[in-house]
Amino acid sequence: MLTSKKWLSQYLDLSDITPEVLADKLTTAGNEVEGLEKMAQGSNLIIGKVLECSDHPDSDHLHVCKVDLGDKVDTIVCGAPNVAAGQKVIVALPGAKLPGGEIKNGVIRGVESNGMICSLLELGVDAKQLSEESKNGIEVLGDDAVVGDRDPLHYLGLDDTLLDVGLTPNRNDCLASWALAKEVGAILHREVQLPECEGAANIGVPTKLKVSSETSKCPIFLGKVIGSVTIKPSPKWMQELLHAAGVKSINNVVDISNFVMLETGQPTHFYDAAKMHQEIIVKDGFDTTYTALDGVDYKIEPEDIMITTQGNPVGIAGIMGGDDSKIDEQTKGIIIEVATFNYVQVRNTARRLNITSDAAVRNAKEIEPMAVYKAMDRCVQLLIEYADASLIEETAQYGTNNYVPAEFTVNTDSINHLLGTDFSEDEIMTELKWLDLKPEKAGNDIKVSIPSYRTDLKIEADIAEEVIRLIGYDRLPSTLPTMSMTVGALDNRQAMRRRIRSMYVNMGLNETETYTLVSQKHLDHAILPITPAVELASPMSEDRKYIRSSILPSMLDAAAYNNNRSIKDLAFFEISNVYAKDVVEERLALVLNGLMHKSRWQKMSVPADFYTIKGLIETMLSQLGYEGSRVSIKENKLDTTHFHPYRSACIYIGKELFGIFGQIHPQMAKDFDVPKELVMFEGKLDVLLNNKPSKVKYTPISKYPAVTRDLAFVVKEDVKVADIVEAIRKCGRQIIKGIEVFDVYTGEHVEKGFKSIALSINFQSDEKTLTDGEINSVHEKILAALKAELDAILRG
């Protein structure tokens, strides 16, 4: 919420309060002021009049000006293209400090210059609030400017400080300056005087205007015909206040609409009566394109609320009016619209259309029930005073808000119990009075009546919160919490998570933290997804609409980001939760690309491929106590949409699927803009927790010699190497210490449909030196087992 000290000063006396103190008081009371900014800055300024203006003798764009400063005439060199004799201007005298630096006397191309004629940009005024003319030249003041006046910022209405108040979600009321003024009055214990306008709209001759709604999303709609208005500039004070709120002044009628919205928090809309018909209906169900006031064509969906006349849309309800009914210089009469719309629908429409108008911001939140009547009264009052409004008709109304002020009782002891304080009843009554809650004693209780604009106050706990934030949190007694003594220790999940992180960091991988909120695309490409997906009720954008059910799609975004910045060697891991409705799973994911390790000096490199990621997973499982027959790797038949069908595999702990790893599918690589050689893995850490690990035991190195024998077998191409290794291991688990495949060959000398597998088998005993007979016995068993189980033939 953007407001200013001058705006708040309309309603209560702040003459002895600096902007800094005001910001501190608001922040302490829970309304954090996120920024203070002067509308314009500059010391040692004065209003002058240009008496003479001639071209500089040594420049094609500079001018030499004689400027009357009231008590003297000085020469100033000015480069602005619009400077001319007879103008009243802002002059920064030597020694003036501006946002761009200090002004000093000088000589510019041989001509003495004693100061600077200023533009508003040079005084630090926000460029967004300035016209092109003001941006490109000095500011020319009106004829009423007094030469010699030492406070030109006051003359311009720029002697104000802006306060950017960050409101909490429950304080939508403070989007209205009237309510914010009430808040400041309660904090400072000062009387607040709001404009007297109640009942101002209860005038007019009988009207032919009819207003109605054909959707439940518009429960109340007020319309009023003002038959005659005069379009002219707004009064200076109104322009200044709108400027302070970041709203550009257009004309008196449009400005009144914006001003009333900022005062009451209720958006209003004025239509040119000549461009409208005498019946206005609120509808939904449109599927069309509509051109709004900003000139942009918006795609309207059936759920969007539209204002219509004769069946044609004239505005997007609660968000923005149409280009075909706007107020312009030819407008003679207007129709005022003040209505309440379903704020959830307004928020959804505004987000989808990417419209962040002031009206949309307010209508997207719950507005106080009486705001429609306050806004209508204030509009009529200001239009009569500043737009010569006449030929006024009665207010046409559809629906009602059925508003009844909320009343309930609170108890001093209960409030103190909730807060842990010892406030007296008089203290609490005083604060409730300043909050406009009209407190009355009712026996041992206090009866409060909630004003319409405080829709956030519903129960006793809300009143307790109001009391403590106004009296001050420093009144809370300092106490130490009572806590039971516990021994700090990691549970199994925490310990496993820490070990995995430590392992992979030591192996040279980098840990990532990617977004938990994802788009529909990420949901569609989830690995081992859990369902149903959790959709946010009010997402920030379509890219952050769902809570993810898989980690890998988010990590692929990180891989693409790095790859597009010429970082080709990637080694990432992430441990994170994924979610579905009523389901939470902890997952581990790996992404590798390029080279895992390389040394140009040693001419050595380790590619990040299928076997590398397989080794990383197996090493992790081994160190956690999952290895041998408990871990099995099988052909991937579960997901060949995201993984390459012939270069990926599933890994199981016992009979339970742990995860899928392998090379990315080429189509998925294209969709995520990552290299098609990238390999990845996603697994369920809960599977490890559900299976008890084996104890990792220390085994001393055997002191007896080892014997290595190399064997080559010819087998059918569909025989798996893992089956060969397992068959060999079963023949002599006590003395077979290692099996390494060092060659797989197909081609010449090997029959078509077959392949040659060459292995090294390491024989060693922990108890004695093996004899040839013992080794040969196992050797014969191996040959027989492979022949019987896999039809393997020893290659000659």
Image (cartoon, grey):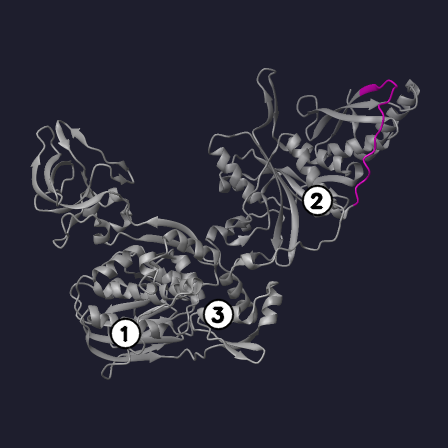
Residue labelled with disc 3: 430
Q: Is residue 525 above or below residue 277?
A: above
Circle 2 — which element? helix
Circle 1 — which element? loop
Please state the horizontal and vertical placement of residue 684, each as a whole percent of the image: 68, 46
Give the side of residue 377 with respect to residue 79, left or right. right
Ranked by sequence position, the earlier of labels 1 and 2 is: 1
The amino acid type of the residue labelled 1 equals Gln
Q: How many numbered discs sit on the rendered protein?
A: 3
Q: Is residue 494 above or below residue 404?
A: above
Please state the horizontal and vertical placement of residue 769, each as a whole percent of the image: 91, 19
Q: Label 3: how many residues lie within 10 Å, few (<14), some (14-19) or many (20+)?
A: some
Q: Which-is-in-front pick, marks 3 and 1? A: 3
The quadrant of the image that shows the C terminus is top right
Q: Which residue is at the front of the view, 15 or 141?
A: 15
Residue labelled with disc 1: 310
Q: CA distance from mark 3 to mark 1?
A: 55 Å
Residue labelled with disc 2: 494
Which stretch is magenta? 692-709
Furthest-bottom residue in this view: 206
The amino acid type of the residue labelled 3 equals Thr
Tell me if label 1 and label 2 are in contact, CB under 8 Å: no
Tell me if label 3 and label 2 are in contact, CB under 8 Å: no
Circle 3 — which element? helix
Q: Which residue is at the front of the view, 372 or 41?
A: 41
The amino acid type of the residue labelled 2 equals Gln
